[in-house]
Image (cartoon, rainbow, N blue to C red):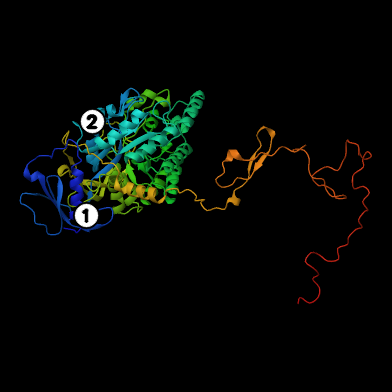
Amino acid sequence: MFKSDTVVEEVIQVKQAQILDAEPWQGDSAQNRILIKGGQVVNEDHTFFADVYVEDGIIKQLGQNLITPGGARVIEAKGKYVIPGGVDTQTHLQQPVNGTVSSDDFYTGTRAALAGGTTTVLDVVMPQRGEPLLDAYHKWREFADKKACCDYSLHVAVTWWSEKVKLEMSELASEHGINSFKMFMAFKDKWQLSDAELLKAFSHCKQIGALAQVHAENGDVIKEMTERLLAAGVTGPEGHELSRPEEVEAEATLRACVLAHQVGCPLHVAPVMSRSAGEVLAARRRQGHLVGGEACAAALATDGTHQWNRCWRHAAAHVTSPPLRPDPATPEHLTGLLANDDLQCASSNHCAFTIEQKAAGKDNFTKIPQGVNGIEDRMSIVWEKGVASGKMDVCQFVAVTSTNASKLFNLYPQKGVIAVGSDADIVIWDGQAKQTLSAKTHQERLDFSVFEGLRCRGAPAWVLARGRLCLEEGQLRVVQGAGRLLARPPFAPHLYRRVQQRDTAGLPAPVNRDGVPDDADPPVVDVSNGVRRVAETFSGRPAEDVESLPPAEDEFHSRQEPAEGVRNQQNSGFAVSGEDQLPRGAQIDDKAPKRTGVKVHAPPGGKSAGSFW
């Protein structure tokens, strides 16, 4: 056992007390006890060879030559990696959209997640405009509680703003374990918040210890561009990307970063779909701002050129928001940002619709349900694009698929790490496995995959969800309703330690002007009503007591007369009226003797001839 195990186990016990409606999974003793032997354990910061003993859904022992109770199921993991189960930070399961519902519910969606190595999903509660946040939260609980096959948690979207919304955010954070809220800068007249509302939402998120998330696109520009495109006869899927080009995403990303920074609120942009938006986040992080973001699986594996495909079904299947970008270099660039920690998480942003559902927008791209798949293939795509390509090592793979998310959303170390006391969410990963992704073989309830035909290296061989064996060498066995809702306490230490320190260190201080001499005070000038009032203000003397000076005759039009024979460069010497009027065309200095020419005998600085000394 390692030195830090006791500390980790104590933290875990506190976390587990926060689980809502959680009952320990009951099964036969052999299934409750599993020994994983011979694998290479991988955490975000290091790897080591060790055996892992699991009992009652918890990692109980970790090390070499373990002494374990008899009757445990033994899994030989030699030549494979033993990694924490994946944490998917953004899904949209069973989400109502434009009169339809996303095709995967909490059963089929979490089932597909487990097939790909993801053991925890964070879904987004989407209240309609004007709908109480608490009502929407309870609706999602009803969707998920009896269906989820793996543990889940919830973000709550703030789709409108009022004092009631503010109070409900506080209640969700303190009573229901919701520590993240998502705001939309797009979808005008539906979910979009104004800049003033965003500032209020960000400020309140900080006050209640939550992480603010944004969907970053400029909704006003999108509305204008959409109207122009439809008027020009552009109705197909290509119009979707044309109406919300890359710079519209980048502008909104920058604006969100600026607004959040003004109130000191940590910000997470979800998802980041373009190179320029990613670079905005990278630049802000280098300036020390508390901002971050995630790339989704589709943006890492494919691009937006498919929206121009002549087959409408194929093109429509790739419509999502923000859009996949037509720049073919985007996937590689986003992978690089993940590898460099400019982006922290790889999500699926899974919001799948069948071709029949997408056909609602056959004659108008604005009516195409927006979303793509990815909940099952996310981890294999990150391995292929990151590890197999040499951009990431296995520790970085664990970080972007599991650990970073666990820390951001305050699930760590219950999730996201192989450690004594942590939940036994464990994936035995085969880095040499090869597969071809296809709608014909995936577990998602979907007749099209945006990854169709993509060859990937890396796949899960075994998957344990809280100690329950769900995937065994290709055979998937899940239990509907076995997943728990995870409460996430506010003020995640990974974020709010820095927030609190910055607030203390960055408090503005007023300028101390005590002890400044009285005669250093400037004069007070009042020019109201065309009258000049000048007085010196003295220490302790009220401003209203200043002495008023009567205006001088011709005060605003006369100047002091120059000495005789001296020309005033400010006043014209040309007389046009008065008793002493000069002859027409005459000037005051007409009688002055002419100066003779002056010959310069040496240039400025003196002669250059002769001895220097």
Mark 1 vs mark 2: give the one in front.
Answer: 2
Say which element carries label 1: strand
Residue at image mark 2: 141
Residue 473 picture quarter: top left
How far apart marks 1 and 2 lie (CA) works out to 34 Å
In the rendered image, residue 42, in percent from the top left (x then y), is placed at 24, 54
Residue at 57% x, 44% y: name it. 541
Mark 1, residue position? 41
The tag on residue 489 is: none
Quarter of the image where the N terminus is located: bottom left
**Rendering coords of residue 69 (x, y %):** 6, 52
- Say whether residue 484 is left or right of residue 164: left
Amino acid type at circle 2 is Arg
Q: Earlier in the sequence, mark 1 or mark 2?
A: 1
Residue 351 shows up from this direction: no
Q: In the rendered view of the protein, which quadrant contains the C terminus? A: bottom right
Determine whether the residue tagged by mark 2 lies in a helix, strand or loop. helix
Q: Could you tell me residue 277's position as x and y percent?
A: 44, 42
Relative vertical location of residue 27 with respect to residue 399 in this rendering, above or below: above
Q: Is residue 432 visible?
A: yes
Total marks in image: 2
| Amino acid under disc 1 | Val
